[in-house]
Image: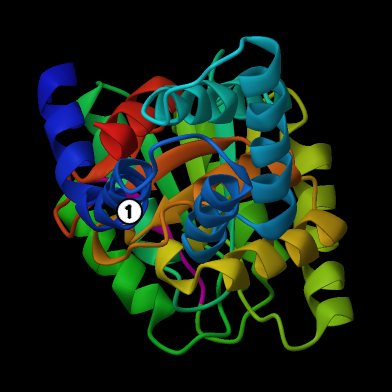
Amino acid sequence: MTKQNFFEKLMGGLAKTRNDISNKIDGIIRSYKKIDDDLFEDLEEVLITADVGASTSMDLIEKIKTRVREEKIREPEEVKELLKEEIREKMLESTNDNQLNINPSPAIILVVGVNGVGKTTTIGKLAHSFKEEGKKVLIAAGDTFRAAAIEQLEEWAKRAQVDLISHKEGADPAAVIYDGIQAAKARKSDILICDTAGRLHNKSNLMNELNKVFRVTEKEYGNASKEVLLVLDATTGQNAISQAKVFKEVANITGIAITKLDGTAKGGVIIALQSELKLPVKLVGVGEGIEDLQPFIVEDFLEAIFK
């Protein structure tokens, strides 16, 4: 898919968020003749309701107030561009790399996240995308506790035309990952994508399970490029932030994949994740199709929201 098509998909996927943020900001700015505290208050409210997060929103507004004062800005319409610049600054200063760490080969991607966020779908789409790039991909079905997780992955593996390593339901996830690593070595795979357990109701269980998986990975595949990808559902807004905080405590998350961006006005949560939690967003899902998982680019994201 060309960069142009990617951007058009992103524009379409972020339509609801754009309506919620950009159109509301335009409406507010048009209703003011001069810049004053009420204008700033209204802008802050738009950001908070778009799930940008209270502390990030307040910080952004403070920075804009300072710039308005220092640069002697008088016209309300200039404030929107300032906001865009400050969000860009905030997102870029919090992380310097939004790319997946899969070079050099071999690489292993451990995919974590609670059930229902689109973990299996993300793995399938990711496998397809790597396969299209000519890479040799293998999937390991390590979420052995959720009924149907293995079958779903089998279906995706078929669609993406990649091999799958799986055990029966209820098996030890670390054992599945171990077998996946041995198979990846034997078959000289470029990338091994591992599904992992997604139960959050008991944090210590989750921690123990993930730690076992990480230990196996370190011991058996220490030389591989490694990515620990947290999948979050954009439609859950602030709940996605809470999930990210928990997973950040129990695992060394290296990146985030945000799903279902096209079905929500809460795309502002991306700004909060990156600026508050310092977690780089690396992939965004903007549709149901197998091609609808895209690399995340800050500039494109801001263009799509503020256009």
- Residue 253 image offset from top left, x and y in percent: 72, 45
Q: Please determine whether, in this image, residue 26 is positioned above or below residue 130.
A: below
Q: Is residue 84 left or right of residue 69?
A: left
> Residue 103: percent from the left, percent from the top?
54, 15
Q: Secondary structure at mark 1?
A: helix
In this rendering, the count of numbered labels is 1
Q: In the rendered image, which residue does mark 1 sit on? A: 24
| Residue 59 position in % (x across, y down) | 73, 40
Q: Is residue 151 above or below residue 283?
A: below
In this picture the colour scheme is rainbow
Query: Can you see residue 217?
Result: yes
Q: Which residues are magenta?
A: 161-167
Quadrant occupied by the C terminus: top left
**Residue in front for this viewpoint, 86 or 127:** 86
Q: Which residue does the image show at 83% across and 40% down from the upper left?
A: 219
Q: Residue at x 68, y 25 (%)?
A: 95
Residue 165 in magenta stretch: yes
